C-alpha cells in the first residue's frame, strides 16, 4: 500500500493583525504554525488537515472576537457550535467545504500589506508510482484563487507541441 503526502508551505509570513483570532486558531489547526515576529508562518509536512478538533472554549472566545469581521468561516463555525452538544469540550470541524484557501482569501481582502498570498504544494508518495508525484501552486488574491498543477502544466506543453506539429 502506498502512502500519499502533500507537503505544503505558505511562504509569506502572515501578520497576526491581518487575521481574526478565529482564522488564526483554525489555520493553526489545519497547518503547523510557527510564530515569526508579529506574524505566523504556516506549513504542513504531510498536507493541510481538513478535519480538525478544536477546543470549544477557545473556539467560542475566537468566534466572539471575530463577531464584527467579514470572515466567511465565522458563519460556518457559528452553525457548528449551535448544532453541537454544549457539553462537548471539543468541536470537530470538517473544513473541506470551506477550505483554508477561502480563509486566506479573506485575509488578503482585509490586509493592508498583502495583495496576494502564494501556496506551494508537493505531491509525494511512499512508493515510486507515476501518479504519486507532482505539485501545485496557488495564487490567492482578493478576487480570485488561481491554481496550476504540474499535470496541468505538462498538458499545456503537450497541447502546444501538438499544435506546432499540426500547424
Image (cartoon, helix red, strand yellow):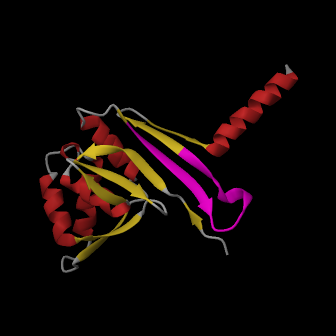
- The residue depicted at 61 percent of the width and 70 percent of the height is 3
Left or right of 25? Residue 133 is right
Query: Up-down: is 153 above or below 28?
Result: above
* Coordinates of residue 105 in the picture (x, y in percent): 35, 41
Camera-side residue: 156 or 11?
A: 11
Point out the image quarter for the C terminus: top right
Residue 54 included in the magenta stretch of the image: no
Residue 134 included in the magenta stretch of the image: yes
Point out the image quarter for the N terminus: bottom right
Query: Up-down: is 39 above or below 126?
Result: above
- The residue depicted at 79 percent of the width and 29 percent of the height is 161
* Coordinates of residue 137 in the picture (x, y in percent): 52, 42
* Coordinates of residue 103 in the picture (x, y in percent): 33, 48
- The residue depicted at 42 percent of the width and 63 percent of the height is 49
> In the picture, residue 126 is in which quadrant?
bottom right
What span is in magenta?
117-136
Give the farthest residue toward the right: 166
Left or right of 162? Residue 73 is left
Q: Main secondary structure of the magenta part?
A: strand
Left or right of 5? Residue 8 is left
Q: How many marks?
A: 0
Camera-side residue: 166 or 40?
A: 40
- The residue depicted at 49 percent of the width and 46 percent of the height is 120
* Coordinates of residue 34 in the picture (x, y in percent): 30, 57
> In the picture, residue 165 is in which quadrant?
top right
Amino acid at each position: 500500500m502506498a502512502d500519499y503526502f502533500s507537503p505544503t508551505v505558505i511562504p509569506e509570513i502572515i501578520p497576526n493583525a491581518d487575521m481574526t483570532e478565529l482564522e488564526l486558531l483554525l489555520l493553526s489547526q489545519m497547518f503547523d504554525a510557527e510564530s515569526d515576529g508579529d506574524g505566523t508562518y504556516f506549513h504542513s509536512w504531510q498536507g493541510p488537515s481538513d478535519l480538525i478538533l478544536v477546543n470549544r472554549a477557545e473556539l467560542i472566545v475566537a468566534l466572539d472576537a471575530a463577531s464584527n469581521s467579514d470572515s466567511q468561516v465565522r458563519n460556518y463555525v457559528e452553525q457548528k457550535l449551535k448544532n453541537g452538544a454544549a457539553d462537548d469540550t471539543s468541536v470537530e470541524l470538517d473544513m473541506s467545504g470551506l477550505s483554508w484557501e477561502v480563509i486566506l482569501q479573506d485575509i488578503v481582502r482585509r490586509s493592508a500589506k498583502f495583495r496576494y498570498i502564494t501556496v506551494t504544494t508537493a505531491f509525494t508518495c511512499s512508493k515510486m508510482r507515476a501518479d504519486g508525484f507532482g505539485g501545485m501552486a496557488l495564487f490567492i488574491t482578493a478576487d480570485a484563487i488561481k491554481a496550476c498543477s504540474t499535470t496541468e502544466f505538462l498538458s499545456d506543453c503537450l497541447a502546444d507541441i501538438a499544435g506546432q506539429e499540426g500547424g
